[in-house]
Image (cartoon, helix red, strand yellow):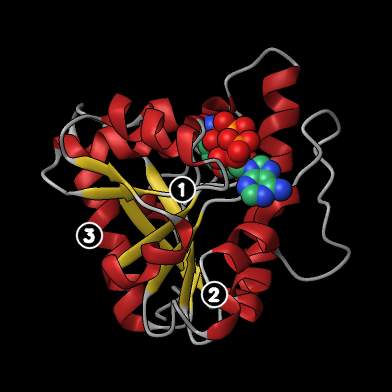
């Protein structure tokens, strides 16, 4: 869901992993063009026909258009009920890194709007062009994810694996605000001219003595 940069770059990476995709957005021409750039594995769908044709929905829409985009695909009427919905939105002021929702998170807004959907927050911290990752497995990017539905978390984990990444489960969907705040930090590091990959401590797992989150 979305016809911009992230939809296209993730779409290309998943297409090369063997998935077939359907692109939708408020502008049908943008959807056709994005699907065309992804390649033969992708088609374009009218928002009204989209939900019934997909198993997993990846939300790659600007924060300002999030509710409108969900409404367009019938999410308020339950069109996404029971489906895995992976929210990649960064509800962040790109200049200041400040989080835009006064409380909660974009992912929780998706869960409230998309009646019955199984929402997972994931993939928002990495530029779409980071994928697919093809280097050594022990250096594969760790994608922090959170959500409440085990089956949806499993599907997101498998899709992240298909990008070459490793999913790192951090908790239930209420953790999404913290994951979204991290995007603000990443953007501040980028605008200061540094690679955010090197802006966090390199912790040797052998010295980790913290409780692991299991859900
Ligand atoms: N680009 C990345 O590498 C990256 C990485 C991680 C997370 N993200 C997040 O992913 C989301 C998409 O980013 P992007 O880079 O793909 O942005 P983008 O290239 O600007 O595309 C934005 C998409 O949102 C749609 N949109 C904007 N306002 C809308 C509205 N009011 N109603 C319905 N749809 C609307 C646009 O539709 P139109 O084409 O009709 O304008 C377009 O499909 C953002 O939340 C961003 O923070 C991006």
Residue 165 on image: x %, y %: 29, 44
**Residues under numbered marks 1 and 2 in contact, where contact means CB atoms less than 8 Å apart:** no
Q: Nearer the viewer, residue 165 or 102?
A: 102
Residue 32: image quadrant is top left
What residue does disc 3 label?
158
In the image, residue 198 above or below residue 28: above
In the image, residue 95 above or below residue 143: above
Which element carries disc 3, helix, strand or loop?
A: helix
Of mark 2 and mark 3, the one earlier in the sequence is 2
Residue in view at x 69 percent, y 12 percent? 193
Please indicate whether residue 27 sits to the left or right of residue 203 in the image. right
Tell us which disc is closer to us: 2 or 3: 2
Which element carries disc 1, helix, strand or loop?
A: loop
Q: Tell me the number on the disc at residue 71.
A: none
Residue 149 on image: x %, y %: 40, 83
Residue 123 on image: x %, y %: 46, 48
**Residues under numbered marks 3 and 1 in contact, where contact means CB atoms less than 8 Å apart:** no
Badge 1 residue CB within 8 Å of ligand 1: yes
The residue positioned farthest toward the top in the image shown:
193
Residue 51: image quadrant is bottom left
Of mark 1 and mark 2, the one earlier in the sequence is 2
Mark 2 and mark 3: Cα distance apart in space: 24 Å
Which element carries disc 2, helix, strand or loop?
A: helix
Camera sees residue 70:
yes
What residue does disc 1 label?
123
Mark 1 and mark 2: Cα distance apart in space: 21 Å
Q: Quadrant of ligand 1?
A: top right
What residue does disc 2 label?
75
């Amino acid at each position: 869901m979305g016809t911009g940069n992230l939809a296209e770059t993730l779409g290309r990476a998943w297409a090369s992993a063997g998935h077939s995709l359907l692109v939708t957005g408020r502008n049908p021409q943008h959807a056709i063009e994005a699907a065309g750039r992804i390649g033969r594995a992708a088609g374009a769908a009218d928002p009204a026909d989209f939900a019934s044709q997909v198993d997993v929905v990846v939300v790659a829409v600007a924060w300002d258009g999030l509710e409108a985009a969900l409404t367009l695909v019938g999410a308020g009427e339950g069109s996404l009920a029971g489906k895995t919905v992976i929210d990649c939105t960064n509800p962040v002021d790109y200049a200041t890194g400040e989080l835009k929702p006064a409380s909660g998170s974009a992912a929780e807004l998706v869960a409230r709007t998309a009646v019955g959907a199984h929402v997972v927050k994931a993939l928002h911290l990495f530029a779409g062009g980071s994928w697919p990752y093809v280097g050594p497995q022990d250096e594969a990017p760790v994608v922090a994810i959170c959500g409440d539905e085990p089956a949806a978390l499993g599907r997101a984990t498998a899709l992240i694996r298909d990008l070459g990444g490793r999913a790192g489960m951090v908790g239930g969907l209420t953790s999404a605000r913290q994951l979204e705040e991290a995007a603000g930090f990443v953007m501040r590091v980028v605008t200061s001219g540094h690679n955010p990959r090197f802006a966090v401590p390199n912790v040797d797992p052998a010295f980790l003595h913290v409780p692991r989150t299991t859900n």
